[in-house]
Image: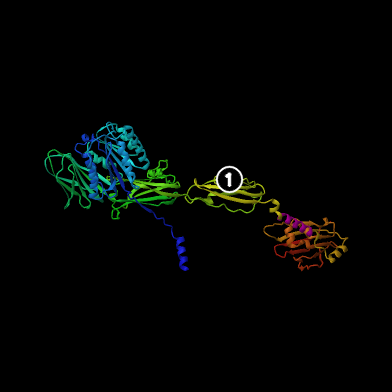
Amino acid sequence: MLLIILCLFLNLFSPFVVCAEEFTSEKSGLDVMFVMDYSGSMKSNDSMDMARGMVKAFVDTVHSTDIRVGFVAYNDRILSSTSPLAIRTSEERAVIKELIDKETYSGNTDIGLGLSYGCELINNTEKRKRVIVLISDGESDLHGSNTGRKWEDSQRDIEETAKQCAVDGIQIYTIAFGAYDGNKNALEVISETTSAQMYTAETPEKLIEILYGIFNTNMDYSIREVTDSVYAPGKQNIRVGLEEKYLDELDILLISPQNIGDVHILYHDKEIETINHKNYVVGKITEIDDDITELTVQLETEKNQELQIYLVSYRALSPVFSVNTSMNKNEELHCELYFRDKAGNMVEDEAFYQNFTCRFWMNNTEDIGNTEEEENTKNKPLDNGNIQILNTKIIHGHIQGNETLKQSGTWLLYGHLEDPMGSIELAPIQVTVKNRVPEGELPKIDKCTVLSKETQIQLNDYFSDPDGDNLVYTLKDTGTKALQAEITDEVLRVKPVEAGTGIVELDITDGEAVYTCTYEAEVIPLWKAYWWVAVLAVILCIAIVWKLTHKPKPKPQLKQLVADTRKNQFCGKLDAYFTLQPETEEIRPLSFSMYQFADNKLSLDVLFHEYPEAIEALELDAMYLVADEERKMVLYHTSKSSVMIGNSIVCREIQYSVSFGDVIYITSPNKRYDLEIHYIAVIQ
């Protein structure tokens, strides 16, 4: 049990780590369908039979790991054909080359027939990248043909095939070969319909460069012309520098209008086996040593022999894209790109990465659907005006990209990588950017009345956005009349206006998500809120009445004394001095003329009525003076105060005579007041 609790604790309080996903750009394979014109006009355009030779040279030199080649030979009929075949071995390549050499140039031209048949053959393959290369020296020409087809039939097949290939994602590259007899715009239309390109190859030897140019985004390769010269008769030693690293294959291609004799290719201490087809020679090196920086081509040339030598280099590196596919808005997206060699080892050569031009960008778009048309366009960035370019840099043997995404949604991350060996378009990676809802609650308030003050709430103190966005506050109309609310400078002001239940609804938005918060308060009626005031008033009235009706009644002794001295009157004067009193109260000396009182009995609280606190503290309302004979007075009290006449203590409920010149001393029970009363005689 203790172990389970410890695991839960570590899970809750350990930092949350987001791991990036790795995406390896695996090649899905390429199928190439050559659709080649074998009409009679090709005899004059390709008298040396080099057009077919260059197609065969391509088959011999192209890297065979992930490519298959199909072939259609046509004039006004289909002469020979095959669906795409593997070319991994020399035996497999020989099958294709024999098919290319099987027929001769003759007859009319029916481009529509050859193109539609080639499309049919390549469409029967599984879902791989598919390309058709159409090589022709002129437009369709069916004059004199006995096939029953007309130019209109061929043209209709061309248009329909181009449209179907565009739907199926098959590109048709067209090559106007030799002295092209016709309108090249027709070939351009075919290529443009399928998002491809039209080329012109005036000479056969240029055909090989065009073929490799077509596939520059489908294979990691470079083709470099080593020499293009006219040689004198004799032995030639041609040195070829090797600069690229991490290569999987090297091919040496020699092309000449004349026959090429024996060729020896020396790669360090090895002689490479060659394939000689009269007008071209191929040497294939599959065991690459990066420490070897040069090879030598040895051959014997004839007089004025034209010779072109190409070095075709293939690289088998796999790009790996590392990126977080789920993140929050306003966080930094971090991605890395690096290569693994064919053995699976990571390439960390920073100098190697410096050769690349890299661009990462992101496009905020809707989720990709599953329709076939969307499937064909999913690798293309959508131009919806919301593209963000990532900052890229090369560091620690990686190409890094960074960007802060300020908008949520589904983003597609694209990458384009280019170096002298070609370019790579990385498949888009879907990144989900989440927008978190604003957080917070309004403070709770107690019941209030219409007399309550306006409540002011600084909203930014109570609400925040987890993604750091600025918040906007909006009041919703709830129809309530009990509360009056408004927002000014992000301060919510709420004022009760009438009794009832008041509800204020507040929308808080970060620009994307909306969070609604409810503020509720009960405005109670005044009578219900202040009932205790009425109760206190009643109690106070009762207390006053009780006090008025329950004054201490004189004792029988005092009553008798008053009755006995009814004929006597007060005379003289009393001077009063507070010798001790609280600092908060200041009572100056007082003087009272006693003859102004008509009755013969007087309570001292009447004399000091302006000082109720002193009366209460000294209990003066329980002390009485009664007029006596010979200008004397009788002092009688029932209080708890200390009372003295001169040096004599005056006990409660006992009569004491006060003569002219006597001093009465009174001290309160709490010792806060001391009072002296002097009885001074005056002449009436």
Q: Which residue is mark 1?
A: 476
Against 644, residue 346 (above or below) is above
Q: Quadrant of residue 118?
A: top left
The residue most toward the left is 234
Residue 278 rendering spot, x and y as whole percentages: 17, 43
Along the line of sight, which residue is nearer the eye, 597 or 615?
615
Mark 1: amino acid: Lys
In this rendering, position of residue 349 left or right of residue 560:
left
Against 22, residue 636 (above or below) is below
Residue 212 rendering spot, x and y as whole percentages: 26, 42
On the question of residue 70 being in view, the answer is: yes
* Quadrant including the C terminus: bottom right
Residue 277 rendering spot, x and y as whole percentages: 18, 44
On the question of residue 61 being in view, the answer is: no
Residue 285 rendering spot, x and y as whole percentages: 21, 50
Where are the magenta residues, as a range?
532-547
Along the line of sight, which residue is nearer the eye, 585 or 414?
414
